[in-house]
């Protein structure tokens, strides 16, 4: 038995419809399924499917009673803390998707740039935004993080 990959990330949306619109129009997701579960006070929930058809984002309405890390922010200016720090998407062009996200209501956090990680250096191009719903999202161009073929010297 082994892990095959990440199935989905679940988020609770302050504005359910606007959040879904952002992921569809900016990141190219599509709605795979929609449901409600009154027993859990879930009025609206949707599973959005990524363009690669493997990774999904589950969106819940703001009043849904679901297990969560951290606490809801009291205002848009507040930062919440929990186990999830951010999530990242591989993209073809960081600059393009960053600008597209900003035109759809996202706020810039880290402008597109190259970043050198560790020794030996691994150079990545990335950018980070706050989505209109408040998620911290990183955009990163394709990079091979597998260092299993490298020898690490201490």
Image: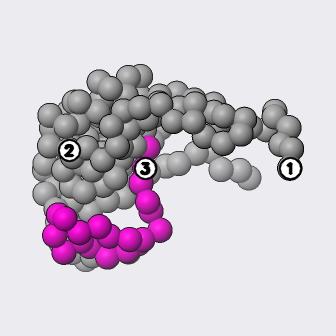
The residue that appears at 19% across and 75% down in the rendered structure is 74
Asked if residue 92 is among those painted magenta in the image, a careful observer would answer no
User: Disc 1 and disc 3: Cα gap in Å?
Assistant: 30 Å
Dominant secondary structure of the residues highlighted in magenta in the image: loop
Q: Residue 29 in the image: x percent, y percent?
A: 30, 36
Q: Residue 110 in the image: x percent, y percent?
A: 34, 43
Give the residue pinned by disc 3: 87
21 and 30: which is toward the camera: 21
63 and 116: which is toward the camera: 116
Give the residue pinned by disc 2: 106
Q: Residue 11 in the image: x percent, y percent?
A: 31, 59
Q: Is residue 126 left or right of residue 60?
A: right
Q: Which of the two discs, 1 and 3, labels the residue nearer the N terminus?
A: 3
Q: Judging from the image, what secondary structure is the residue with disc 1 in? A: loop
Q: Which mark is residue 154?
A: 1
> Is residue 38 shown to the viewer in this render?
no
Q: Which of the two discs, 3 and 2, labels the residue nearer the N terminus?
A: 3
How packed is label 2: few (under 14 Cα within 10 Å), some, or many (20 or more)? many
Q: Judging from the image, what secondary structure is the residue with disc 2 in? A: loop
Q: Is residue 70 left or right of residue 143?
A: left
Q: Nearer the viewer, mark 3 or mark 2?
A: 2
User: Disc 2 and disc 1: Cα gap in Å?
Assistant: 41 Å
Where does the magenta region start and end? Answer: 69-88
Image: 140 above or below 6: above
Q: Nearer the viewer, mark 1 or mark 3?
A: 1
The residue that appears at 60% across and 40% down in the rendered structure is 117
Count of picture labels: 3
Image: 20 above or below 100: below
User: Disc 3 and disc 2: Cα gap in Å?
Assistant: 15 Å
Image: 71 above or below 52: below
């Amino acid at each position: 038995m082994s892990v095959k990959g990440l199935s989905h990330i679940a988020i609770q949306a302050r504005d359910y419809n606007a959040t879904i619109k952002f992921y569809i129009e900016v990141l190219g997701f599509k709605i795979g399924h929609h449901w409600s579960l009154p027993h859990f006070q879930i009025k609206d929930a949707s599973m959005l499917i990524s363009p690669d058809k493997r990774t999904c984002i589950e969106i819940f309405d703001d009043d849904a009673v679901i297990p969560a890390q951290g606490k809801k922010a009291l205002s848009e200016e507040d930062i919440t803390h929990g186990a999830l720090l951010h999530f990242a998407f591989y993209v073809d062009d960081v600059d393009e998707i960053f600008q597209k996200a900003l035109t759809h209501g996202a706020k810039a956090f880290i402008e597109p740039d190259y970043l050198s990680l560790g020794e030996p250096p691994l150079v990545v191009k990335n950018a980070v935004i706050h989505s209109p719903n408040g998620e911290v999202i990183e955009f990163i161009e394709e990079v091979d993080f597998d260092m299993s073929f490298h020898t690490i010297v201490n």
